[in-house]
Image (cartoon, coloured by chain):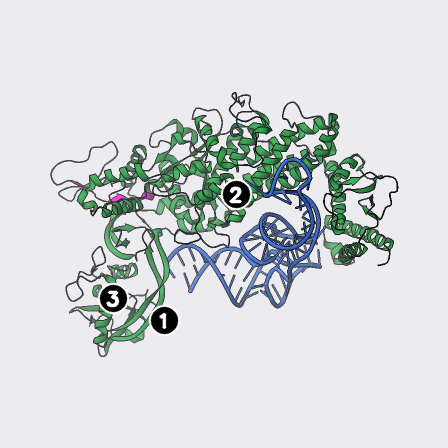
Chain colours: A green, B blue
Amino acid sequence: MTDTNQRPGGAAPSSPDDLPTQYVPAEVEGTLYERWVERGYFEADAKSDKPPYTIVIPPPNVTGSLHLGHAFQHTLMDALTRRKRMQGYESLWLPGMDHAGIATQNKVEQQLADEGRSRHDLGREAFVERVWQWKSEYGGRILGQMRRLGDGVDWSRERFTMDEGLSRAVLTIFKRLYDDGLVYRAERIINWCPRCLTAISDIEVEYQDDDGELVSIRYGEGDDSLVVATTRAETMLGDTAVAVHPDDERYRHLVGTRIKLPLTDRTIPVVADAHVDPEFGTGAVKVTPAHDPNDFAIGQRHDLEALTVMDERGVITVHGPFQGLDRFEARSAIVGALREQGRIVAEKRPYVHSVGHCSRCKTTVEPRLSMQWWVKVGPLAKAAGDAVRDGRVAIHPAEMSRRYFDWVDNMHDWCISRQLWWGHRIPVWYGPNDEVVCVGPDEEPPSGEGWTQESDVLDTWFSSGLWPFSTLGWPEQTPDLAKFYPTDVLLTGHDIIFFWVARMMMFGLYAMDGQIPFGTIALTGLVRDEHGKKMSKSNPNSVDPLDWMDAYGADAVRFTLARGANPGADVPIGEDWVQGSRNFANKIWNATRFALMNGATIEGELPPAERQSAADRWILSRLNSVVAEVDAYYDDFQFAKLSDALFHFAWDEVFDWYVELSKTTFAAGGEAANASRRVLGEVLDVTLRLLHPIVPFVTEQLWTTLTGRESVVIAEWPKDSGFRDAAAEAEIATLQQVITEVRRFRADQGLQPGQRVPARLTLDGTPLAPHEDAIRSLLRLQPVEEGFTATASLPVAGARVELDLSGAIDFAAERKRLAKDLAVAEKEQKQANAKLGNSGFLAKAPEKVVEGIRARLATAEADIERITAQLASLPEA
RNA sequence: GGGCGCAUAGCUCAGCGGUAGAGCGCUGCUCUUACAAAGCAGAUGUCACAGGUUCGAAUCCUGUUGUGCCCA
């Protein structure tokens, strides 16, 4: 606990009277968050002596709003950075957004379309101005939502990929790559979106199985003809060859000849290419180098012409009857025309096959031959792979590494130019005599007649790839960069390995002279609904996390997500579960209220062990075990495990047992009560601190009230004191066993929970004598009086509880219960005997296991003896 | 077509060589002054199927079926 962590006068409630009987998140969350920000708890200091801990947020889109996937990952990143802050690190969680080139431009173009205008009416400069205006009005909705969630980010360091510093970083790296020969310009087949009118990268193409058609067409005449099959008949207008396998006897006579291309006046060559699969279809394929990547490759090998037959909107441009038709209209028109000519040999419809769609607008992607800028990824991807291979960067969970390697080791050159206006314009000028000049950030572009700048902009991920260091001030050598780079963890969904992770790795290693951008890549699964179905905006199962936060509080959403976070696995979430987490928050709330009402305190030293009760020693022993357990889980990104451990410790041990036992102690008063007040204060203090990174709001409210200190945000993270007390743990376990057994008897006998029953306790020979008051209180047992007659006698764990049920005992129920217990014990005995009678087991099983079985056998036999005696003592039915 | 993963209680998932677990749901009794958003007690599984390895398999291996994801 730091000395500075003192509450300023009257800033927070300080008495249990200020706590209502239910936790109402809406009443505290907003206030607490604003207070945290005002006090600067989340602002990192580059001049600090503390060791740094840094996470940069994977930048969300400026157009985006918070969905459950963000809420999930943010909860985990927040938990990591909050814990490290409490552990004494200079903890920085850096927020910001990317400019989302296509998505943002689409938004503004839509706005313009509503006004009956296009971006071309405005011109480039005015359009970009308009996008900035859009951003200031509508962009960044997610930032406000992050506050609702409680994200402890350093708002003073918020960055945007299009801001001045980051743009400078983009220009700097582009120039360096250009000078190193790692960016180049080339005409290639790229994925083109005929609606967005831009190139998109491979990973922006989503493949899905669509109903199409497979049409077999006869090319050529008579003996000199062959049949090709295609799903895209419209591209035949751009065919410049037919290819067959060189060893294919069926077509050998045609190789080297030219055949007639139907519907045109052209003839095309038949070429032999080993990449043709003779087994597939007819073994002959049409070749359209300008409209298919494989055909482009064939075209290169055989020096074929690449004939573009569509414009950028997918409209046929070839002179003739099909000119001006959209590509899909052209498809049916062309098939119709071929059918009339008797050239259709077969038609399969529907023919299900995989078709690429633009991830932004779902339009069918058109492979298109065009001039683009590329990053030569070879050496960059090699370095990115090696950094993981040689252990400098760890991937969690490790099983995901394979996917990372598969990607970086087989990466194609990266097309980075986009035919957009919103983005970083490529800093290349073309001169009147075909000069090409790349201009660095401090250089003057060439001026004069005939010089023009490249009109394309860079892929958004080009700038996102710089994020781990551009946000810290690079290319300037800033104090932030020195203090906080390399960052510690990049936490993101496994679906995003290719988008951010690989690019940040490549650029980080390249720009920072081989320094890794982050030490650990922590990959999460995807959030799904309560039936494991994928959530997406187009699905009705999509949930707005804000709705759940309104209904149950941010902590409830956070706890549910954290508790579902098994490494790498998908996280299902349903409203019932959020409700359950809300109930947990309320439980903590009320337990703390109870503690405050009974004078729990954190003031002063813990009472020495000899003045602690067994319950005190037991709960402190367990508390320290849990601290160690939680720490181990945190270090292994086991959020589900640590959340679950805290849930069960708090509820099942502290609230259900320690608090219940403390009621007896408090009622009795005296020194034991004082000791218990201090221990209860300690247990709650530590438990609240342990829970804080996951559920920051409720813990802040309760912890400040309990301790009278300033904030749990800046409290010290608990340390395992090393205290363990196995004897106390065993003693309380025995106590629990006795209480549970008698409660079960009461329930079997149909006694109402509150009904008082006279009972005689015989605790000799057990460690339970000091617990008699607690046992009587928890079991509603009255002292024996005149005329006490024990109608039931329960032996358990060496103790004996005799009850006077005034003859009302239900012997049949008791007999049934005992018979069932007996069957369990006998089964246990049988199994244990079978093992111990197996010589192979005795010879080969570890001693510890054999011991365990012997102990089980002993317990089972003792149970059998006890239960048999009990049964014998019951009167006949 | 290739690769990876998963099949455990009604649902969603842990466990991954030595007594089958959790949350929610379900059944019964309780408003016992921290909490009914709660308490107490209870029920529920040939751990997909078939082989194999082992003293011992939900757990390791092989195959089958079903299912999901990624890549082409």
What amino acid does circle 2 point to?
Ala
Residue drawn at 34 percent across, 46 percent down: A377
Magenta-drawn stretch contains A106: no
Report which quarter residue A481 is drawn in: top left
Q: Main secondary structure of the magenta part?
A: loop
Pick the quarter of the image with the C terminus of chain A.
Answer: bottom right
Q: Is residue A547 visible?
A: yes
Pick the quarter of the image with the N terminus of chain A.
Answer: top right
Give x and y (percent) for residue A542. 43, 50
Say which element carries label 3.
helix
**Eyeballing the image, is A554 above or below A860?**
above
Circle 1 residue: A279
Front: mark 1 or 2: 2
Front: mark 1 or 3: 3
Circle 2 residue: A562
Which region is colored magenta? A448-460
Say which element carries label 1.
loop
Q: Chain of mark 2?
A: A
Bin the neighbour count of mark 1 within 10 Å (Cα to Cα): few under 14, some 14-19, many 20 and up. few
Q: In the rendered structure, which disc, 2 or 3, sits on the residue that comes first in sequence?
A: 3
Circle 3 residue: A331
Q: Chain of mark 1?
A: A
Bin the neighbour count of mark 3 within 10 Å (Cα to Cα): few under 14, some 14-19, many 20 and up. some
Task: Residue lying at the far bottom in this picture: please name it.
Answer: A222
Q: Chain of mark 3?
A: A
Report which quarter residue B59 is drawn in: bottom right
Q: Is residue A245 visible?
A: no
Say which element carries label 2.
helix
Separation of residues labelled 1 and 3 (CA atoms): 26 Å
Bin the neighbour count of mark 2 within 10 Å (Cα to Cα): few under 14, some 14-19, many 20 and up. many
Q: In the rendered structure, which disc, 1 or 3, sits on the residue that comes first in sequence?
A: 1
